[in-house]
Image: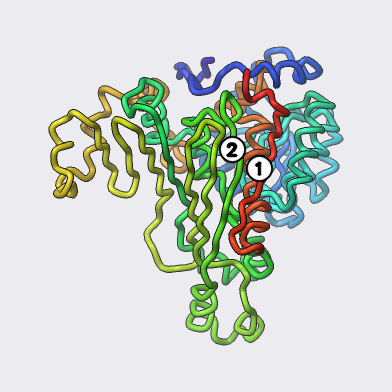
Amino acid sequence: MKIKVFNHEICVCALLATNSLCTKAAQKWCKKMKDKIHVGMIGLGARGSGLLEMVFVQHPDVEFAVVCDSYSDRCEKAADIIEKSGKKRPAVTTDYRDVLAMPEVDAVILCTSWEHHVDLCIEAMEAGKPVGCEVGGAYSVRECWKLVETYEKTGVPVMMMENCVYGRDEMMVLNMAEQGVLGTVVHCEGGYKHDLREEVAFGKENRHYRLENYIHRNAENYPTHELGPIARILHINRGNRMLTLTSVASKAAGLKEYIRDKKPEDQVLNNVDFNQADVVNTIITCANGETILLTLDTTLPRYYSRGFTVQGTKGMYMEDNKSLFIEGEEHAEDHFTWSKHWNNVEEYRDKYEHPVWKKYIEEGVKEGHDGMDWLTFCDFVKFIQTGSEAPVDVYDMAAWMCITPLTEQSIAMGGQPVAIPDFTNGAWMRR
């Protein structure tokens, strides 16, 4: 598949295989190639407005028919951003149903709070609008099944806008794994390790949804950043699948101490006992024998990391020290003095850089999380224009999102193993 970037082309998603399961359902939904698509955008908080300003308005093939948020000031701000970019000012509404009813809307982008993702995806599919949905965990396994069932009934596709699948190092390691450089991949790790104490503690003031989740839930609440790239490497839903998980959680102390120190005047929050643990560790087993370790770590002081680690029989990659360890190479003799080889990834760029990123760098990397957001959005636009399959499809979305409620169950049962559903109903073996 090729996407246009202004006057140039980038090959995007060589990582995405043909998907016969999606093709069968998608026969019900087909659009002719369009030069431009008209988007309706729902959800204009920090993530939505940031993507709009830095990424979405830059795409030459996209016009915005309407923008929507429950807060009218956000709608007007988004409309201003679009108009200032040189595009036609969109309609504004605080009712998402207006967006779904507009015949001129070719596709919908959802950047709402977590709890509205699945319901709005389902309503959009039922309205015949393909969807690009921002990330987050689900609230029940049942809603993940409803997502898949609605797609199979309507054939209207959903793409999860998981930008980390498009990360430079993630795609380079994928390229290396596909070439066998790391040998047989045995174990992978990933994490969402991000100090969110300020964001959560000031959630009421900033109209941010994470606060209520951290008060009431205890789960791996944001699994897809770390799991998405790993799922590609392990061919999850495409010759492999996740079988079980076991999840354990630490105490919840970091956020309460932060609020005591930074918001002593907030008597309500100072008397809240948060349910969300400071650190959650989840082990996933796979049908082909691999294991995955996911770590959520968002309410303690720390540096940002997604902890992306891939271990195979011939080598490994580790994000935290930006290093590759490959058997047979000179550096591999330094088992006990490995720190002098940290940050050696750049030495491998010429040989193993993913073709997508080679071309992307030549043409100029765009804004948005080190360029990942642009590649994600370009793939979304292209699949809408061509009527093709979603690069990160509904089966991926359901499998990745269901990790949240399943970890919630496992933690509540003291770390008991929980089965992970097969949303493909066996088709993973031949996809």
**Foreground pick, 419 / 33:** 419
* Residue situated furthest top in the rendering: 32
CA distance separating discs 2 and 1: 6 Å
Res 59 visible: no
Q: Which residue is mark 2?
A: 242
**Foreground pick, 350 / 180:** 180
**Dot 2 or dot 1, earlier in sequence:** 2
Q: Residue 65 — which label?
A: none
Q: Which residue is mark 1?
A: 420
Question: In which quadrant will I find the N terminus?
Answer: top right
Mark 1: few, some, or many residues within 10 Å (few <14, many ≥20)? some
From the viewer's perspective, is 270 left or right of 37?
A: left
Q: Quadrant of residue 272?
A: bottom right
Q: Secondary structure at mark 2?
A: strand
- Please say if the residues under marks 2 and 1 sit with CB atoms less than 8 Å apart: yes
* 173, above or below 274, in the image: above
- Badge 1 amino acid: Ile
* 231, above or below 250, in the image: above
